[in-house]
Amino acid sequence: MKTGPTEPPHLPEYLPVLDGLRGVAVLMVISYHSLTGLRSASLGSLFQVGWAGVDLFFVLSGFLITRILVQTRARGGYFRTFYARRALRIWPLYFLVLVFTFGVMGRLLPALAFDTHRYAWTTYALYLQNLWMTDFGPAPINVTWSLAIEEQFYLVWPLLVFFLRNGQLRALLWACVLLSPAARLVALWEGAAPIQVYTFTLFRLDGLALGGCWRWAWWMAAPRWTAWRGGARGSRCPRCSWPSGCPSSSSARGPPSTWQRRSRGQAALRSVR
């Protein structure tokens, strides 16, 4: 395991803005599936961008999961805790839907019956339904392809976070951001079915990876953001009137011997100029 700095103490555990983004993603997906048929005032064309709500979900998931894993990888029970929480969060409702779809729905609602040989319950139970899809499958499990991508991400990403260094993780994330769209284009060029390109895991890694990159950017920007918020509340550096934590404050400059040498060097440069 390659440990590194975890979240800075000033970054809150709960980020309300993410709930707002989740709500936006939900509305986008619902509008795409329910309101794209509208024709009045060209609203239908407006709601056609709702497909991007799935991508927003992937970005949020990449951010949150990467943040959780980096925070907890130095603690005991890293794998057990993560996988147990994911299972308790997702599996009960998901498998209840599978039981209803494969065991009850066809008997209660014959009009919704489907070919259980073509759509095998084991494929859905193992979260493999998104691999080499020819169609999205029967309702209500036709939307579970994105959940399958999430579960596959949950299976692999904790291992990589645990064993790779921070720099290696960032490089891997950026590689996925850049290479996944390129892989989609190549696959379409070679004649792959659009639905397979849309739902296959390796072609959708850019959203998850972008969320992971967002986590690193958030971690790096958090101290400066907190300093500006402190300035807005009136906590400012007495030397330069910037928010507390600015480069001229003693806490940010380090020991006196360090910033005194720095000041003498800057004065020497000014005299030369």
Image (cartoon, rainbow, N blue to C red):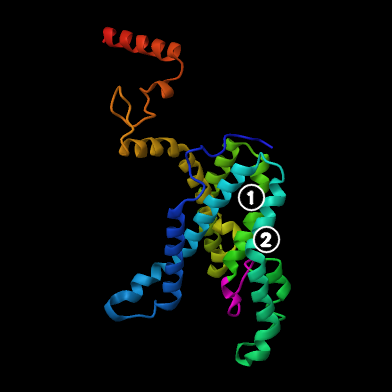
Residue nearer the viewer, 73 or 241: 241
Image: 220 above or below 51: above
Which disc, if any, is residue 157? 1
Indicate which disc residue 120 carries. Answer: none
- Is residue 68 highlighted in magenta? no
Whether residue 140 appears in magenta in the rendering, the answer is: yes
Position of residue 205 relative to residue 229, above or below, is below
Q: Say whether residue 135 is visible.
A: no
Q: How many numbered marks appear?
A: 2
Residue 131: x and y in percent read: 64, 66
Q: Which residue is at 65% across, 39% downward? A: 164
Residue at image point 40% right, 20% down: 250
Q: Position of residue 10 (x, y in %)?
A: 47, 39
Q: Is residue 114 above or below residue 64?
A: below
What stretch of residues is rendered in magenta?
Answer: 130-143
- Residue type of the residue flagged with mark 2: Ala
**Dominant secondary structure of the residues highlighted in magenta in the image:** loop
Label 1 is placed on what type of residue?
Trp
For disc 2, the marked residue is 87
Q: Quadrant of the C terminus?
A: top left
User: Which quadrant: the N terminus?
Assistant: top right
User: Callout 2: helix, strand or loop?
Assistant: helix
- Residue in front for this viewpoint, 23 or 146: 23
Q: Residue at x 41, y 73 (%)?
A: 31
Q: Which residue appears at 67% of the width and 74% of the height?
A: 96
Left or right of residue 6, residue 35 in this image: left
For mark 1, give the secondary structure: helix
| Quarter of the image where one finds residue 271 | top left
